[in-house]
Image: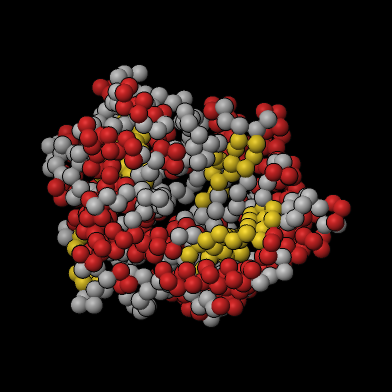
Amino acid sequence: MGKLALSDDILLKIEKPARYIGNEVNSVIKDKDSVDIRFAMCFPDVYEIGMSHLGIQILYDMLNRYEDTWCERVYSPWTDLDSMMRERDIALFALESQDPIKDFDFLGITIQYEMCYTNILQILDLSKIPFHACDRDWDCPIVIGGGPCSYNPEPIADFFDIFYIGEGETQYRPLLDLYKQCKNAGCSRREFLIKAAQLPGMYVPQLYEVIYHADNTIKSFTPLVNEIPKTITKEIVTDITNTTYPEKPVVPFIKCTQDRVVLEIQRGCIRGCRFCQAGQLYRPVRERDAKMLKEYAVKMLDNTGYEEISLSSLSSSDYSQLEELINFLIERCKEKKVNISLPSLRIDAFSLDVMEKVQDVRKSSLTFAPEAGSQRLRNVINKGLTEEVILKGATLAFEGGWNRVKLYFMLGLPTETDEDIRGIAELSDKIAMAYYDTVPKEKRNGRVQIVASTSFFVPKPFTPFQWAPQCTKEQFLEKAYTTKRAIMEQLNQKSIKYNWHEAEASVMEGILARGDRRLCEPILKAYQKGCMFDSWGEYYKHDVWLETFAECGIDTSFYTTRERSLDEIFPWDFIDCGVTKEFLKREWQNALKESVTKNCKEQCNACGAARFQCGICTMPRTAEA
């Protein structure tokens, strides 16, 4: 390895210097003079978070399989190094080569969460890349964004050259080929961007114009160039078994959020929860074949030395070959003394039997996500989980030796009443009672422990709740206090612990989630005032954000608490995510009627995703409009 970008005296002064030195096991080193394209893949958060992101692992592996491309990694420097880099005028660098990011051809930024927007600006700033895409020339890399937040890219539209809408496995090769052609032909940067905007899934914000009504809603969204599409359709991998997947993921030097092999067993979810953006964006459900997963599990464990393997999915219990895969993993992992992590499982007899085989019963908690305290509100959000099923699962768990249960709920859901909120406390108490009714006194391992946690509901684009008003900070806090008071009134209150999320950050997330291009200015100004690492509670500066919005003439309630009409043009309506707006309207109206929609395995609900002709949409079911 060559010379490090940071001197020894800096590395000795900062926390966790291993974040910045590269050279980890399975990282890819190439001769930079033998490649045509250098691609810096970025996760705009600290190393430990970014290294745990599966999407970057997949794209890093895919791009490095191309002989003409070298993909490297870069993450947000933590606050200690950030200040030192500014003091000493050190440019942000990639881990593998330690070369400045500005020297690369592409800077690809995965945008997983709205609260990382100021960290994107940190990356650009430290890289010495102009904030605004319109100010860049060929001396700067092409800045391309992807990930869930790119489905409403408008609040950060000014800062990106391109947004890749959809799954990254399909269009990077055509984009890189186009880049090489344009560079060899002496095209201008704008000429390249116009050609790139004609590739499927590519959105170039500076080539589109937004006009607003007097009330600040959108009047029109139109292309400024004839050749580019008015609507951008998401890219999707139709066969996820026979696509790229990393056999040799990079192994970090330090402990990361997910310190394990991650096996993605399927994409999408059949459940149709109305609050869940991922459940809509990743339709239709597509499964990886168990044979492929078995092969990759063995290779990835051998190539990394990890002592844990995790199955990744929005709803693992719905994977049709789960039993076959788990039985294989139990056998293999027993030999190698490897632990198996099984998130997103429904708690039933099969799941409990599996968990008993793969983990130490006495050391684990079981997790339920009822999301709402009453059956009425669970019907509103289409959760598809009844109190009877929850209590049955808890009873089975208690019989099997578990005595700790985590419960996840949301506060501020559409149509929520005080009675629904009290239901959180009452359901927690019923689960505690089930323990004492199920487990004889002489067999109890102490008191049952119920941890009830509430987050605050944030309406997201491309969900049926994109029309819903969001609560104010004061309303959120009052709902949390109501929950706490109700828990204190329960018979088993000493067995129930209650946690709730930060209200201010939830309000900010709501502003950014449904924002438009007018938020680019306050986001930049907030960053220039010191806002960064907003997703980390200790660094979030709510007062600075509110002050900045006021200075920019932004009424934040426009993005959060106001009612939206069904015919309003949303900032993200130019994107086709596969699910039609008519379907989402229908689901919003079903929510208001407290009507449950069956899941995709039971019937087709004509959401629009069948046009991709893959996954569950190719299975015979009943269609219902």
Q: Which residue sits at x=48%, y=65%?
A: 456
Q: Quadrant of residue 24?
A: top left
**209 sits left or right of 571 in the view:** left
Q: How is the image coloured?
A: secondary structure
Between 556 and 58, the one lying in front of the other is 556
| Above or below 172: residue 461 | below
Quarter containing the N terminus: top left
| Above or below 145: residue 510 | below
Q: Position of residue 7 (x, y in %)?
A: 29, 23
Q: Which residue sits at x=36%, y=39%?
A: 78
Q: Which residue sits at x=29%, y=64%?
A: 546
**108 sits left or right of 383 in the view:** left
Between 151 and 215, the one lying in front of the other is 215
| Count of marks placed on residues | 0
Q: Position of residue 429 (x, y in %)?
A: 70, 67
Residue 613 visible in the snapshot: no
Q: Position of residue 172 (x, y in %)?
A: 33, 42
Q: Which residue sits at x=73%, y=45%?
A: 361
**83 sits left or right of 417 in the view:** left
Q: Position of residue 272 (x, y in %)?
A: 53, 64
| Above or below 45: residue 113 | below
Residue 160 visible in the snapshot: yes
